Image (cartoon, helix red, strand yellow):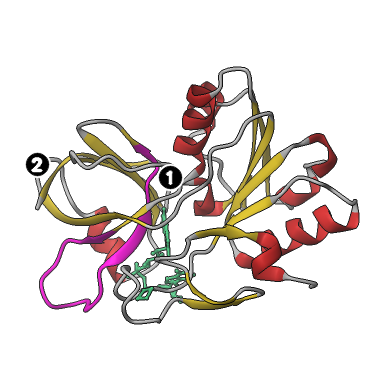
Amino acid sequence: MAKIISNERLSKDFFLMKVEEENHAVMGQFYMLRAWGEYPLLSRPISVFDADEHSVSFLYKVVGKGTEIFAGLKAGAEIKLDGPHGNGFPEAEGKIALVGGGVGIAPLYLTAKTLKKLNPASKVDIYLGFSDQAILVDSYEKVADQVTLNVGGFVTDDIDPLQYDVIMTCGPEIMMKVLYKKCRSVGAKAPLYVSMENRMACGIGACLVCTCKTTAGNKRACKDGPVMLGSEVFGDE
Ligand SMILES: Cc1cc2nc3c(=O)[nH]c(=O)nc-3n(C[C@H](O)[C@H](O)[C@H](O)COP(=O)(O)OP(=O)(O)OC[C@H]3O[C@@H](n4cnc5c(N)ncnc54)[C@H](O)[C@@H]3O)c2cc1C
Ligand code: FES
């Protein structure tokens, strides 16, 4: 069990939880979280928002029973962390765009921070899309060269894929697919990496619940992903 350092409400539905943790997570990975006994049955997968040698943070949106329980936890309480799991975003350099929709912005914070640390000369632009209220914009501005905010519209409208060497995205599958199609339609050369947030059960590659069809065969989002190439996931669509 790990001790919760803080669990702050950021808006009506969004919370940021910081937990004591020694295992070092990298950009785009996730943990399976649990703060209950028997019910709900399954632990909940949540991306790493930020991490250092002694802690890990999670940005989460309350959508059901599990996340509702997380939201009620106070500093000092304990939570079970299983992870970090999965293959996250790849190391990259040059002009990089990170595109997030809703709670899909979560893994992009550590990703921007890591990419800038790996190569300070890289230009990292972040596109944040929210349906109503924006959160954490100041924090993202600290780790990126430029932040473009879209509230109530389509964040995919804001990006010119031709400006970038690499594009990484996380959010609703439909948003990632629209971005993939836009990249194709303008003839962008930049590879697009998508983070697949399929429903999960075991989180470690054993149950196949999170399987998705790709051009390279069936893949498990938890073990082979969650980050995959958009071209593998969406193919000729
Ligand atoms: C790899 C991965 C990383 C994730 N990272 C984050 C994160 O950083 N922050 C965050 O808030 N959430 C994240 N999620 C989604 C999160 O796991 C679910 O929102 C959570 O499990 C819901 O649990 P619940 O008990 O609150 O809701 P439930 O009662 O289980 O579900 C409530 C509603 O949410 C829908 N839902 C549940 N899981 C998903 C899902 N995976 N995709 C789409 N809809 C879903 C259900 O269909 C239902 O309508 C991630 C999911 C995956 C697979
Ligand atoms: S969640 Fe069990 S294989 Fe991915």
Badge 1: residue crowd in 10 Å (few <14, some 14–19, many ≥20): few
Left or right: 211 with respect to 58? right
Quadrant where the C terminus lies?
A: bottom right
Q: Quadrant of residue 7?
A: top left
Which residue is located at x 53 percent, y 30 percent?
115
Pointer 2 or 1: first along the chain: 1
Segment tinted magenta in the rendering? 32-50
Badge 2: residue crowd in 10 Å (few <14, some 14–19, many ≥20): few
Residue at far front of view: 216
Tell me the mark number nearer the camera, choosing from 2 and 1: 2
Q: Amino acid at mark 2?
A: Gly
Q: Amino acid at mark 1?
A: Ser
Residue at far top of view: 121
Which residue is located at x 15 percent, y 54 percent?
79
Question: Is 228 or 39 nearer to us in this picture?
Answer: 228
The percent coordinates of residue 109 (x first, y second) are 48, 37
Question: Is 96 or 129 nearer to us in this picture?
Answer: 96
Residue 53 vertical placement versus 67 (above, below): above
Alpha-carbon distance for marks 2 and 1?
Answer: 22 Å
Left or right: 31 with respect to 153? left
Residue 21 vertical placement versus 217 (above, below): above
Magenta run includes residue 15: no
Residue tagged by mark 1?
11
Quarter of the rendered image showing ligand 1: bottom left
Left or right: 27 with respect to 74? right
Which residue is located at x 15 percent, y 41 percent?
75
Residue 213 vertical placement versus 67 (above, below): below
The percent coordinates of residue 140 (x first, y second) are 52, 30
Residue tagged by mark 2?
76
Q: Secondary structure at mark 2?
A: loop
